[in-house]
Image (cartoon, coloured by chain):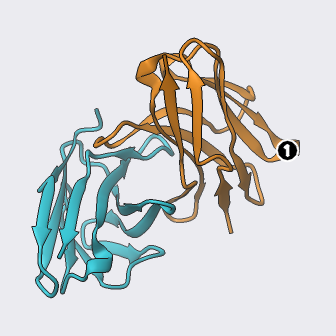
Chain colours: A orange, B cyan
Amino acid sequence: AQSVTQPDIHITVSEGASLELRCNYSYGATPYLFWYVQSPGQGLQLLLKYFSGDTLVQGIKGFEAEFKRSQSSFNLRKPSVHWSDAAEYFCAVGAWGGYQKVTFGIGTKLQVIP
Amino acid sequence: DAGITQSPRHKVTETGTPVTLRCHQTENHRYMYWYRQDPGHGLRLIHYSYGVKDTDKGEVSDGYSVSRSKTEDFLLTLESATSSQTSVYFCAITPGDTDTQYFGPGTRLTVL
C-alpha cells in the first residue's frame, strides 16, 4: 500500500528566507509524486509533479522538488519565500491501478512572517 | 483551470436529510473523483468514476453513493447526512493524456 508522510504540520518562515517542506513516501515501484498548494477557502492547485527522468523538478511560483529514491523523499524547496506563499501544502503519491489512485499527506501549513 | 465546477459551494443541512453535491466538467474527461478533506487526514477518496454509469468505491465510501449518467456530471449523494460527514468535498478529474488529478473549488458541507 502506498503512503505519504509530511512530518511538519506547521512551519513558520520569514519573508525572503529559504523554504524546505519534507515529504516521505512509501511505494513498491517508481511512484508518481505531486505537490499541491491550497490557499484558504480554495481548491488544490498543482505545483509540480515527478513521473520519471530528471530528479530535480521545477514547478510554478518558483518552487522545485527533488526526488531521492534512496531516501524515499520528495522535498519541496523555494529559495526565497514571499508572503503570498502562505498556504497549506500537500504531498501526494500516485499509482495507476485501473484508475489514478492518489494518496495524500496530511499537509504542512506554511506561515510567512514579515 | 481544469474546467471543473462544483455546486453548491456551501451548504448547511440537518442530520438525517439527503444531500446531493454536483461536480460538472466541460472537457469530457473520462475519470472523475470525489474526495473529502478533514483536518489531520488530508484528502481521502470517497468514490471514483471511469465512465458513464461506471463507478467504484474509494477508501471512505460508507454513507455515500454516486451516479454518473452523463460524462460531464458526477453526483455525490449522502442518503441520510450525519454530523461526521461535515467536511469539505472536492471533485477531481484526470485528463486522458496525463496521470495528474486536477481539482474543483470544493463544497463546504455542514451537517447540524
Residue type, mark 1 in image:
Gln
Q: Quadrant of residue A59?
A: top right
Q: Which of these two is toward me, B55 or A44?
A: A44
- Direction from residue A78 to residue B23 in the image, left or right: left
Above or below: residue B22 compared with residue B112 = above
Residue reaching furthest to the front: A114
Q: Is residue B75 visible?
A: no
**Image quadrant occupied by the N terminus of chain A:** bottom right
Above or below: residue B59 compared with residue B102 = below
Q: Which of these two is toward me, A20 or B59?
A: A20
Above or below: residue B8 compared with residue B57 = above
Q: Quadrant of residue A21?
A: top right
Q: Residues within 10 Å of mark 1 (few under 14, many from 20)?
A: few
- Numbered marks: total: 1
**Residue A58 x %, y %:** 60, 21
Q: Residue at x 31, y 55 (%)?
A: B90
- Direction from residue B106 to residue A104 in the image, left or right: right
Residue reaching furthest to the right: A70
Please tell me whether mark 1 sits on a helix, a strand or a loop. Answer: helix
Above or below: residue A63 compared with residue B108 = above
Q: Chain of mark 1?
A: A
**Residue B62 x %, y %:** 37, 84
Q: Residue at x 57, y 11 (%)?
A: A16
**Residue A47 x %, y %:** 50, 31
Q: Is residue A66 visible?
A: yes
Q: Residue at x 32, y 78 (%)?
A: B84
**Residue A55 x %, y %:** 75, 29
Q: Residue at x 50, y 63 (%)?
A: B41
- Direction from residue B43 to residue A56 in the image, left or right: right
Q: Which residue is mark 1?
A: A71
